[in-house]
Image: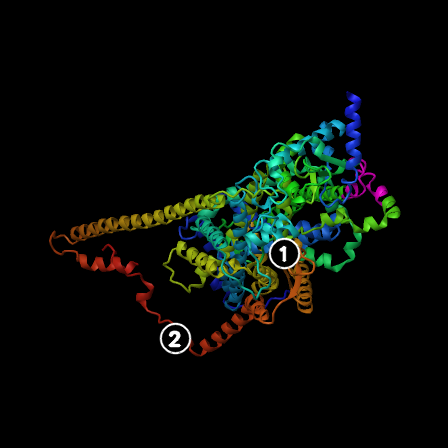
C-alpha cells in the first residue's frame, strides 16, 4: 500500500516538474527566515514542515474557490464544487538551504493547468495571518516574493493626544496668570485702603494737637478739604 | 600709567559707599532681592547652562579633536569666561541697576551698550522661545505609545508608505513634515501652521507666568528648572551605559587628536563657545547680580558658576555621546544585517551562515567569484564613524538623532518625556535671563510710564515677541530661525562684550573698580584679574571678533534646505540666500552693534547743544527750597 502511494507521489512530482520551475509565470518564490524570527526556538525545516506549507496553501486556495466567481467560459464551476484543491495540487520545487523555494498551484480539474497568479495572490493575502501563524512567523520572515505585505494603518486616535496635554498645560498656566494678576490687584487695593485710614488718623491727631496747643478748644477747625487735595497730589 | 578716559561727573551718577551701606540697612521695598543665595546661584547657573551645553558643545568637542578640545576650552574658560563673568557680576552689584542703568551711570554716552544688550536679548529671546515651542510640541506628543515619530503614515491608496517618509526616515519625516511642514526655500513662506502657533502661544504664556513678577516668581521656578536637567542627565547616563554601543560613542567623543590644536579654527570655536555659553553681554547677569546684597562675594560666585558651567558641558557631552554611540551601533548592526540578508537571499545560503564576523571574508570571496550578481545587489557601505558623526549638532541632535535613539529603547515614551522635559527646563531657565535682560532695561529707559507695574512690562514683551515670532510658525520658519541664530546672537554679542570690558576698565577706571571690589568683598582683586581684565581678555575678544567677522563676510552665506527634489535627498541641500536677506542680516546684526556708536554720538551732540542752554539748569538758591515746609509740622 505504502509503495503504491510512494509511486503515485513520484509520478505526480515527475509530471509536475515541468510546471514548477524558477521564474514560472504563475508561481511564487517563498522565503522563510526561521532563525531570524525565532532565534533559539527555531525549528528545523524538513519534509514535515514542507507538508504543512503545502496543506496550508491548499487550505488558502480552498477558501479561494468557495462561492467565488469562476471562469464562466470554461464552465468549470459546476465541476469544481466537488473538486477542491488538495495538497497534491500544491507543487514545490527548487528548495535551497536558505529555506526558499518556488511553488505553483495546479487546477483541481486539470493538473497540467496552473491556477492564475492573481488568484493565488488573493488567496495568500486573505489568509496571510493564518499562514504566518502556522509557522510562528511574520510578514517579514515568511516572504512571498512579489506579494506586498498588507500594511496596517498606524493607529490614530480621535483626539490627537497632544491636544489633551496642551489643554492641561494651558489651563494650568492661564489659571496661574489669573491668580498672580488677581493677587497683585488685591494687594494694591489693600495698600490704598490702608493708607486712607492712616491719613485720617494722623490728621485727627494734628487737629487735636493744634487745638490743645492753641489753648481754646474751638479756635479753629482743621480744613479737611485741604488735606484731601494733599492726598491726591501724593500720587 | 593707568589709561583712563576722562569721565567727569561720574561720582554724581553712581551711589557712593555711604549710600550703599545705607541702602543695605534699609530694606528697600522698591528694588527686589533674592530670598537666599541658592536662588541667585541657581538662577545664574540656569541662565548660563542652556541648550548650547547639550547640543553645541558635544559636537564641537568631537569634531575638534575629542579629548584634546578640552585644552583650548579650559584655557579660554579661565582667560576669557571667568574674568568677563566676574566683571559683569561686580559692576551689577556695585551700581545696583540693570544693564541700561549701569552703562548710563558710568557715562551717558554709553547708554548705547545697554540698548544694544536690550535689542540682542529681545531678538535672541524671540527665536530661542520658538525652539522651546518645538520642544513643547515634542513633549506633548510624547504621551502616547507608540511614539508618533516611530511610524510612517500610509499613502493615499494604502499601498505603501508615504514616499517622503520611505526615502528618508520616520524621525526625519516627523520633524520636517509633521512638525515644521517645511517649505523648500526661505522665500516660499507658506502659511501659518496652526499647531505651531498653539505651541508658540503655550511657550510664551508659560514663560510669562514664570516671569510675571520678575525674580519673585523666577526665583521659585529655578528650584525646579535648574536642578531637574542634572537629575535627568544622570538618569540618561545610567540608562545609556547599560545600552550596547554606548562606550563606542564615549570613546569617539574623547579620543584625542592633538593635531587639531594646531588648527586655529579649534581655538576660535572654543573661544566663541565659552563666550556664548556664559550668556555674557545679554544684560541679564548684570541685572541678577544687582539684586544681591552689597557685600556678596561676587568673585567666588564667578569662579563657582564658571566651573559648574564647564563641568555641565563635559557631563552632558558624555551622556549625549553614550546615547549617540548606542544609536550608531544599532544603525550599523541594521546596515550589516541588511547586507547579510541580501547576500543570503541572492545566493540562497542557509541563515546564520554569514555573520558579522565573517561577513567581510564572504563578501570578498563572492565579489571575486560572482561580481555580476554582487553589483546588482543593493549593498550599502556600513561605516561606524559615519553613523557616529551624523547630525549631532543643534536641532538635528535633539529632534532627529536623539528621538531615533529613543524609539529603539524599551519603554520609549518615558525616555522621550524625560528628555524633552530636560531640554525644556534648560531652555526655560535661559529664557528667564533673557526676559530679565529685556524688561529691566525697558523699565530703566523710562519710555513707558513708570507707574505701570512689572506685570505689564512683562506682558508687553511676551506679546510683542510672540507676535513677531509668528514668522517662525510659517512653513519657512526653520530657515528664519537658522538665520536669526547665525546673525542675531553672534557678532553683536562679541561687540557688546568688548565694549563692556573697555567701558569698565578704561572709562569707569580700573582703579575705581578695584576699590569697589575691595569695598564689596574685602580684598583687592589679585594680579590674575588685573592681567585678564586689562589685557588678555580684551585681546582674545578682539581676535575672535575679527576672525568671526572675516569668516562671515568672506564665505558665501548658504542655508540648508529639505527638498524632496534635491539630488542628495534626504541629505539637506545647501542653497544661497536671496539678495534681500542682506537687509534682514543688517537689521539683526548691524542695528544692535551700531546702536552703541549711534547713541554715543547722539548723547555727545545732546551735551554740546545743552551746554549753550546751560542757564536753564541753574537753580535759584532760596531759603524755602532748603527748608522743608510741610503742612504736617506740629507747632
* Residue A124 rendering spot, x and y as whole percentages: 64, 38
Q: Nearer the viewer, mark 1 or mark 2?
A: 1
- Separation of marks 1 and 2 at Cα, in angstroms: 46 Å
Tell me residue A200's x, y (percent): 22, 51
Front residue (pair B445, B518): B445
Q: Are marks 1 and 2 in contact (CB under 8 Å)?
A: no
Q: Is residue B358 magenta?
A: yes
Same chain, labels 1 and 2: yes
Q: The N terminus of chain B appears in which quarter of the rendering?
A: bottom right
Mark yes or no: residue B172 visible. yes
What is the x, y in percent for residue B589? 58, 66
How packed mark 2 is, by other alpha carbons closer than 10 Å (few <14, some 14-19, many 20 or more), is: few
As for residue B611 lying within the magenta part, the answer is no
Question: Which residue position is annotated with label 1?
Answer: B275
Q: Which mark is residue B616?
A: 2
What's the residue at 63%, 60% (across, down)? B563
Q: Is residue B145 above or below residue B527?
A: above
* Range drawn in magenta: B342-363
Amino acid at each position: 500500500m505504502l509503495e503504491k502511494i510512494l509511486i503515485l507521489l513520484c509520478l505526480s512530482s515527475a509530471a509536475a516538474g515541468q510546471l514548477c520551475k524558477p521564474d514560472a509565470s504563475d508561481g511564487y518564490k517563498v522565503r522563510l527566515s526561521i532563525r531570524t524570527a525565532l532565534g533559539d526556538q527555531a525549528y528545523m525545516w524538513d519534509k514535515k514542515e514542507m507538508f504543512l506549507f503545502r496543506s496550508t496553501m491548499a487550505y488558502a486556495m480552498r477558501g479561494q474557490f468557495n462561492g467565488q466567481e469562476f471562469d464562466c467560459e470554461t464552465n468549470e464551476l459546476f465541476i469544481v464544487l466537488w473538486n477542491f484543491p488538495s495538497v497534491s495540487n500544491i507543487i514545490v520545487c527548487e528548495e535551497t538551504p536558505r529555506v526558499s523555494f518556488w511553488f505553483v498551484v495546479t487546477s483541481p480539474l486539470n493538473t497540467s493547468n496552473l491556477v492564475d497568479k492573481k488568484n493565488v495572490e488573493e488567496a495568500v493575502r486573505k489568509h496571510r495571518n493564518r499562514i504566518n501563524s502556522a509557522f510562528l512567523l511574520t510578514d517579514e520572515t515568511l516572504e512571498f516574493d512579489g506579494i506586498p505585505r498588507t500594511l496596517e494603518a498606524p493607529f490614530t486616535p480621535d483626539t490627537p493626544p497632544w491636544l489633551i496635554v496642551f489643554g492641561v498645560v494651558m489651563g494650568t498656566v492661564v489659571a496661574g496668570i489669573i491668580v498672580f494678576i488677581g493677587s497683585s490687584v488685591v494687594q494694591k487695593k489693600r495698600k490704598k485702603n490702608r493708607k486712607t485710614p492712616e491719613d485720617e488718623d494722623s490728621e485727627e491727631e494734628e487737629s487735636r494737637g493744634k487745638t490743645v496747643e492753641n489753648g481754646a478748644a474751638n479756635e479753629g477747625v482743621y480744613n479737611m478739604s485741604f488735606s484731601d487735595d494733599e492726598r491726591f497730589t501724593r500720587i | 600709567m593707568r589709561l583712563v578716559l576722562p569721565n567727569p561727573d561720574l561720582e554724581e551718577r553712581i551711589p557712593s559707599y555711604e549710600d550703599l551701606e545705607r541702602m543695605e540697612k534699609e530694606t528697600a521695598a522698591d528694588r527686589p532681592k533674592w530670598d537666599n543665595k541658592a536662588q541667585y546661584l541657581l538662577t545664574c547657573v540656569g541662565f548660563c547652562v542652556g541648550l548650547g551645553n547639550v547640543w553645541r558643545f558635544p559636537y564641537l568637542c568631537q569634531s575638534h579633536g575629542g579629548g584634546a578640545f578640552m585644552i583650548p576650552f579650559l584655557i579660554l574658560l579661565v582667560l576669557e569666561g571667568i574674568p568677563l563673568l566676574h566683571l559683569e557680576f561686580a559692576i551689577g552689584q556695585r551700581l545696583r541697576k540693570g544693564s541700561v542703568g549701569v552703562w548710563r551711570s558710568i557715562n551717558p554716552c554709553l547708554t548705547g551698550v545697554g540698548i544694544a544688550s536690550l535689542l540682542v536679548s529681545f531678538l535672541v529671546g524671540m527665536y530661542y522661545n520658538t525652539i522651546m515651542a518645538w520642544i513643547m510640541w515634542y513633549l506633548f506628543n510624547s504621551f502616547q505609545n507608540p511614539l508618533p515619530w516611530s511610524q510612517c503614515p500610509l499613502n493615499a491608496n494604502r499601498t505603501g508608505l508615504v514616499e517622503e517618509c520611505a526615502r528618508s526616515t520616520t524621525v526625519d519625516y516627523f520633524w520636517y513634515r509633521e512638525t515644521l511642514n517645511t517649505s523648500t526655500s526661505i522665500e516660499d513662506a507658506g502659511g501659518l501652521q496652526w499647531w505651531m502657533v498653539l505651541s508658540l502661544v503655550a511657550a510664551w504664556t508659560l514663560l510669562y507666568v514664570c516671569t510675571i513678577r520678575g525674580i519673585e516668581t523666577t526665583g521659585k521656578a529655578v528650584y525646579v528648572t535648574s536642578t531637574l536637567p542634572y537629575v535627568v542627565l544622570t538618569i540618561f547616563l545610567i540608562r545609556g551605559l547599560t545600552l550596547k554601543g554606548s562606550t563606542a560613542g564615549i570613546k569617539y567623543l574623547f579620543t584625542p587628536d592633538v593635531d587639531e590644536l594646531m588648527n586655529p579654527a579649534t581655538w576660535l570655536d572654543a573661544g566663541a563657545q565659552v563666550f556664548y555659553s556664559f550668556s555674557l553681554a545679554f544684560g541679564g547677569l548684570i541685572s541678577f547680580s544687582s539684586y544681591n546684597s552689597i557685600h556678596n562675594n561676587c568673585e567666588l560666585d564667578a569662579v563657582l558658576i564658571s566651573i559648574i558651567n564647564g563641568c555641565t558641558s563635559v557631563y552632558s557631552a558624555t551622556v549625549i555621546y553614550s546615547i549617540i554611540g548606542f544609536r550608531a551601533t544599532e544603525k550599523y548592526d541594521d546596515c550589516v544585517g541588511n547586507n547579510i540578508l541580501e547576500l543570503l537571499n541572492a545566493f540562497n545560503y542557509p541563515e546564520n551562515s554569514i555573520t558579522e564576523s565573517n561577513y567581510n571574508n564572504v563578501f570578498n570571496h563572492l565579489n571575486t567569484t560572482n561580481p555580476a550578481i554582487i553589483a546588482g545587489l543593493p549593498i550599502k557601505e556600513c561605516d561606524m564613524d559615519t553613523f557616529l558623526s551624523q547630525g549631532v549638532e543643534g536641532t538635528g541632535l535633539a529632534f532627529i538623532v536623539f528621538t531615533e535613539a529613543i524609539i529603539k529603547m524599551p519603554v520609549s515614551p518615558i525616555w522621550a518625556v524625560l528628555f524633552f522635559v530636560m531640554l525644556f527646563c534648560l531652555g526655560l531657565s535661559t529664557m528667564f535671563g533673557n526676559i530679565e535682560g529685556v524688561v529691566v532695561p525697558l523699565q530703566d529707559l523710562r519710555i513707558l510710564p513708570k507707574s505701570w507695574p512689572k506685570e505689564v512690562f512683562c506682558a508687553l514683551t511676551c506679546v510683542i515677541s510672540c507676535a513677531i515670532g509668528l514668522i517662525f510658525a510659517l512653513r519657512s520658519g526653520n530657515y528664519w530661525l537658522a538665520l536669526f541664530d547665525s546673525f542675531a546672537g553672534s557678532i553683536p554679542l562679541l561687540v557688546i562684550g568688548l565694549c563692556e570690558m573697555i567701558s569698565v576698565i578704561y572709562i569707569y577706571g580700573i582703579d575705581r573698580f578695584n576699590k569697589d571690589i575691595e569695598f564689596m568683598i574685602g580684598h583687592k582683586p589679585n594680579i590674575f584679574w588685573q592681567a585678564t581684565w586689562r589685557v588678555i581678555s580684551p585681546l582674545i575678544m578682539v581676535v575672535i571678533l575679527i576672525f568671526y567677522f572675516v569668516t562671515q563676510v568672506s564665505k558665501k552665506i548658504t542655508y540648508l534646505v529639505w527638498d524632496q527634489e534635491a539630488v542628495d535627498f534626504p541629505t539637506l541641500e545647501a542653497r544661497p540666500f536671496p539678495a534681500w536677506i542682506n537687509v534682514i542680516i543688517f537689521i539683526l546684526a548691524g542695528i544692535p552693534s551700531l546702536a552703541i556708536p549711534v547713541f554715543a554720538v547722539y548723547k555727545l551732540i545732546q551735551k554740546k547743544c545743552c551746554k549753550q542752554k546751560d542757564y536753564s539748569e541753574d537753580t535759584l538758591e532760596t531759603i524755602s527750597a532748603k527748608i522743608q515746609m510741610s503742612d504736617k509740622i506740629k507747632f
